[in-house]
Image (spheres, helix red, strand yellow):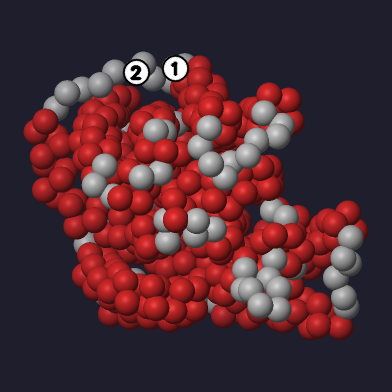
Amino acid sequence: MSLVVRDAFWQIAGRVVSALMGFLVVKLITPYLWPLRYGDYSTILKYFAIWSALADFWIYVLALNSIWKLDNINEKLKLYHKFLWFRFFMVIVIYLLAFCIAFFIPAYVHNPFIINWLVLGMIFSATFMLAGIVQLPLQLNWKMKTVSQALILARVVQVSSLLLIIFVFFPHVNFNNPSFSSITAFLLILSTVFLSWLTQYIYVHRKWSKHMKFKIDFDFWFIKENLKKNWRYGVSYYLSSFHTLIVLIFLSVIFPTAKWFDYVWIWALALALAEILLIVPSALWNSIIHKISSYKKDEKQKSLWYFLTFIIWFGLLMLFNFIIFKSNIISLIAWNHYLSTTSKIWSDYILPFLAFVLFLSFIKQTFNYILVSFDKQNKLFSINVFWVIIWVILWLILIPKYNINGWIITQIVLEFCFVSWILFVARKNGILPKVEWKYVFYSFIIFMFFMIWWYFIDTPNSKILFVIYAFFVNMLYIWVSYKLIMTVMKNI
């Protein structure tokens, strides 16, 4: 059990450190690119991110679950090589389709900053998808410490590259209009993402090659059978993150940067900060899925309850920070141009609302995994399809008419409906985790204590004092709940 806890710790720690450095990346590029080019940068990455979710088709989880059940190492190797081919095939088909479709979107075609570098965005996203499954042997051998090290190293390389570009090679660039210097600088900024991936891949591959040899088993029958068996599962997984990704695609099309809509990307900064944290539930789940899959139903329900308790605790911690430090976070991560004024509603206004969305998304993700662990993943299909259709229709109506308020209200209400429905489905199928309410009660008591404290104590305005104060408050939050969380982690 200590091996599971340690492996989960390293995976979460790596993700958290990577997320913190992700905030630093945002801090560097937002004042450098300004909102318009930051919008173009986000558009390219988010456009292919929505396709990468489809190309993934939950292949990683399927592979991890299937390979773990085998005892013979040769059988494990053979099956792993088939899954490598499955991922390779899906990436080729999906990304070629995505690249062709992009040329039919006027907002992208008429913007030289986007259309000229779509290929680079596609290469990065596609190779990142291929690299993702390469880490699977390390996870099977309880080597997530290596993956976390690679993740952190990749972020260090990206941040270092950004510092050189921004402060040494292209320190003063006017991004308002396309020119040789502005387009080149934009390309280099985008290239840091690819360089980050390359660093991660090389490091992981060196460690990975000690456990397995890289080989692709070109088995079309294997792909056909898996798609036939798991297409509902794959589509459900894709749609579970679809609404988070599609909103930025809508914004980039409805309010294109080529027509000088900069305020959209001032809003989108808050969403970007929330998205960075969405990897926490999946990081923990990937560390425990191959252990939980062998449990009996009662043991599994108990373990999943502790898993859900930790996710709720972490979600409350993020909710606490995004509510009480909203303006400080935006000012620190980005710059004051992203802060609200008496006449403008900007990122600090959105952040607390998105904190609730993030909290609900954590719970929704957890129940997605719960259904998977009981082989009820196909139940997700009807849930996800229904709510995504409702989401898309309402957004197409409300975003153009009500802008930011139409987006936020729809996001919160439908996320709540989504969570309520998936809870109902889990209860109906008798797979709700075995509840020990005292842990959730303790988490909410701690949360409310710190919210009351914030109400009576002002946050420092100085950025340096804010960092010190925020660090102290968060460490105190963790210290107060340390015994609770250690109990939860040991029982997962």
Q: Residue at x 53, y 32 (%)?
A: 179
Task: Tell me if label 1 and label 2 are in contact, CB under 8 Å.
Answer: yes
Q: Is residue 237 left or right of residue 320?
A: left
Foreground residue among 194 and 252: 252
Q: Which residue is mark 2?
A: 214
Residue type at numbered disc 2:
Phe
Label located before the other in sequence (1 or 2): 1
* Residue corresponding to mark 1: 209
Instruction: Check disc 2 and report its element: helix, strand or loop.
Output: loop
Q: Compared with residue 383, is residue 162 higher up or lower down, i.e. above or below?
A: above
In the displayed structure, does residue 46 sit left or right of residue 482? left
The image shows residue 8 at horizontal and vertical percentages of: 56, 46
Task: Say which element carries label 1.
Answer: loop
Report x, y in % for residue 16. 63, 48
Judged left or right of residue 307, residue 103 is left
Can residue 421 be seen in the rendering of this structure? yes
